[in-house]
Amino acid sequence: MDISLRINGEECALSVPASRTLLEALRDDMALTGAKNACNQGVCGSCTVLVDGMPVNACLVLAVNVTGRDITTIEGLGEGGELSVVQQAFVDAGAIQCGFCMSGMIVSATAFLAHNPMPSRDEIRTALSGNLCRCSGYVRVFDAVALAAQRLSP
Amino acid sequence: MSDIESAIGKSPPRLEAAEKAAGQALFSGDMVLPGMLHGALLTSPYAHARILSYDASAALAHPGVKAVVTAEDITGGAIGPLVRDEYALARGKTRYIGEPVAAVAAESEAIARLAARLVEVEYEELPAVATIAEAMAEGAPLLHEDFADYFKIYPAPENGGNLMTRGEAVMGRGTDGFDEADIVVEGVYEVGAQYHAYMEPVSVLAAFAPDGRVTVWSSTQSIFRVQANLHEGLGIPMTKIRCVAARVGGGFGGKAEVSGELVAVMLARKAAAPVRLVLSRDEDMTSMRARHPGTLRVKTGAKADGTLVAREVELWFDAGAYADDSPAVLSVSLQYARGPYNIPHVHVLGHAVYTNKLRFGAFRGFGNPQASFAGESQIDELAEKLGIDPIELRIKNAIKAGDRWLGGQTITSSALGDALRAVRAASDWTRPRAAPAGCKRGLGVSAVAHTCAFLSAGAIVRLQGDGTVIVNTGAVDIGQGSDTALSQMCAAALGLDIEQVSFATPDTDSAPYNYGTVASRVTYTVGHAVHEAAMAVRAQLFDHAAAMLECAPERLELRPGGRVGVSGEPARNAEVSFADIAGRSLYAVGGPITGSGSFMTSDPLDPEHTKTSGLLDLGVLSVRSFGAQAVEVEVDEATGAVRVVEAWCAHDAGRAVNPGAIESQIHGAFTQGMGYALTEELLWEDCRLVNPSFMDYKFPGAMEAPERINAIVLETPEVSHPLGVKGVAEQPLVAAAPAINNAVSAATGLRLKRIPLTPERVLNALLAKG
């Protein structure tokens, strides 16, 4: 099926089978490999991308169902080769270990901070409850989101 | 240590953090080569079956399929680090449900997965054994009829049926020592099977070059173990095998040995095209590895004043269908079963048994979590009976520098007492904890030791033309931060900034041998070699500088940022830059400046001190680091749910190379240990794994993370290391389960002896107690 969508600000036309997930389309057709497949059942959040600004598990979304929509992946968060404020906060807070879950974690955090710019630690915890990490124990992940919120506040 | 070592003790962002934050880090499953095919596995539906025949014709006839491989395509021998009991694909028999039997390479992953199911395998089902008891029963079906003939590097039992290994160690008067005890406690403890749950499933990309060499990029903890397994399992000379680590999405021991690499190489060879094999999560959980489940009978005796006098341990590990690291895990478990205490009379006995389940192997802690859960839970039971505070009891018996470990090795430094005192102070140990209505709270403690020197490692440091250096160790950073820490150690020896050091991608074509990222060994063991290599470069720099500055080398000093100067003469004309020296070496005198380091762990056991049988020789495993944890839990009396409120984790890094990374290791390891204690357990119905998914296998998420994990990094310099460092990657996991169990005891009065402490188990115990 032919679909058109906007990925990281660029219009894209793709021809995909109806069964192709958004995650497969991004990784295999668009060479955007930042989003990861770790559980393939929408539990771990490693494949999180934004669809019209809302975080979704790309492994559970069919590509044909997002035709005409605006997709943002981890690769689209920064500008001009620079990391976004949230990405940089994850680096500076020491939140990143193996990094495999981090694309999804950072995309989720970005969406969360966009509608809750001054979150409490408990709100951060709840917001990231759909993103599993096996390395960090979440301590520095929560620190990173708090740091990003602080840096983004006017 | 001179102040020039400024790169140590700091926490710069890890070298690869920005690329990971950008989503641009390349993991094996992200890599693509021209003409690349995709691999998929066909796995065994039977727990135990004879393979009678294969028919790949339907699979090969499917459009897009390029190759099918089975055991008939194996060109080498059996593999296994300690006993060679398995092949790249099931050969002759299958021994667990999920064991890879055949594999397909096709133009897409979807086609490969579909076609794998078209490979027809005729089986003759055999009776299977699901448990240790079934495996050890009289007349039990044998998994490995030819076990006696297998190549092994440990003394295995003879005529033991499914008994793979039986190890024993006796110190002092062994069990006779209980006659010195005033109080004895005894109990049977059970531990569940924990899955590593590295976020990146097993992934490999294999490609042959026209000259017949194969390059393998994989998610591994050891490029050299992959190379050795490819050599042994497929008969390919090492000269034809190049193994490279891509970024690795976690390992925790699960990728310490080979995983999908042999199958990918077989497919690439047969299809004459690059092949990428990426396991799905359920395939990874069904086909790979987990932590040994088992039972431990533990008995401890003490004098009325709290002096520990005797301990006896009998442990049984379910080892699964193939040995993998099991004999080593058993040996290490027994080494830690005495606990970090000066107990004079000890008898430990352990068994690992083949069953028709996936292989149980290396997992962060390597046998120590099981032994420590049982032993440290029992120390609290003993403390209660003695009427002595559990921290006080531990401090009283804590092992110290100069004391000897089970096996006879001498402890070179110990911060155990300091760690216990640190968590006592930080947790405000004696303050009663208020709990919300319907809940109870309590504090628990545990003490821990774990190793950090293991086998061999090399390092090469080269001076580059601009005065920077590149360090090459072959050590794989699996997320713990070793690329950064080793670079810091190299920078420190040369007075460089970390930006002036590059870290070479682990690649068997260029790296010196390095056993692997296991046993918390990289900082200590590889760090030893890096320091030696950097110091060799430093000596050559000084030789050049002495000639260039016309002074004796003894008068020279390093200056920050890559300069050598005459001490006492700070002027710029009394110094030369590394770049100047590099230019001289490359174009005028002496040739390129390269330093190498080589380290082998050797700390022989003493058979006079500890009598052993059936164990591996663990003289290549040494140097213990110590720690302690205090944990506050809340138990919901209505549901039985246990929640960790706060943890205080004190662990000795010897000297903290990168304090931030050490704290991160403590956070992550404690949380993984919390999962082991509370929720994580692979479950089987007979021989069928019933929860191979992240939906059904529950490890801690953000909601379960403790409110606070207080990482306390102790620094008691290790005398056997030039920089005084120790490794800490595993011990915070080891300590977690017993501390949590002891906290549940403190909160509820229950003495639970089985982990995970699921709500169901806790609630049933609360109801039974009334």
Image (cartoon, rainbow, N blue to C red):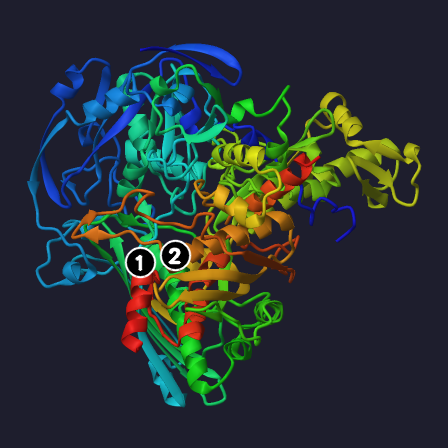
Residue sitting at 44 percent across and 36 percent down? Answer: B223
Q: Residue B676 carries which label?
A: 2
Residue B609 visible? The answer is no
Q: Is residue B154 left or right of residue B252?
A: left
Same subunit: marks 2 and 1: yes
- State the CA–CA distance, disc 2 to disc 1: 8 Å
Q: Are marks 2 and 1 in contact (CB under 8 Å)?
A: yes
Q: Residue furthest left?
A: B124
Residue sitting at 48 percent across and 67 percent down? Answer: B436
In depth, the one of B578 and A44 nearer the eye is A44
The vertical placement of B676 against B99, above or below, is below
Residue B90, how many percent across, how many down? 20, 37
Secondary structure category for the residue under label 1: loop
Label 1 belongs to which residue? Answer: B192
Residue B398, how many percent across, how many down? 53, 74
For mark 1, name the chain.
B
Q: Which amino acid does label 2 sit on?
A: Tyr
Q: What residue type is labelled 1?
A: Gly
Residue A22, how many percent across, how many down? 38, 22
In depth, the one of B396 and B486 nearer the eye is B396
Q: Is residue B446 left or right of residue B148?
A: right
Q: Where does the C terminus of chain B fall, quadrant-wise?
A: bottom left
Question: Pointer 1: residues within 10 angstroms few (<14), some, or many (20+)?
Answer: many
For mark 2, name the chain.
B
Of labels 2 and 1, earlier in sequence is: 1
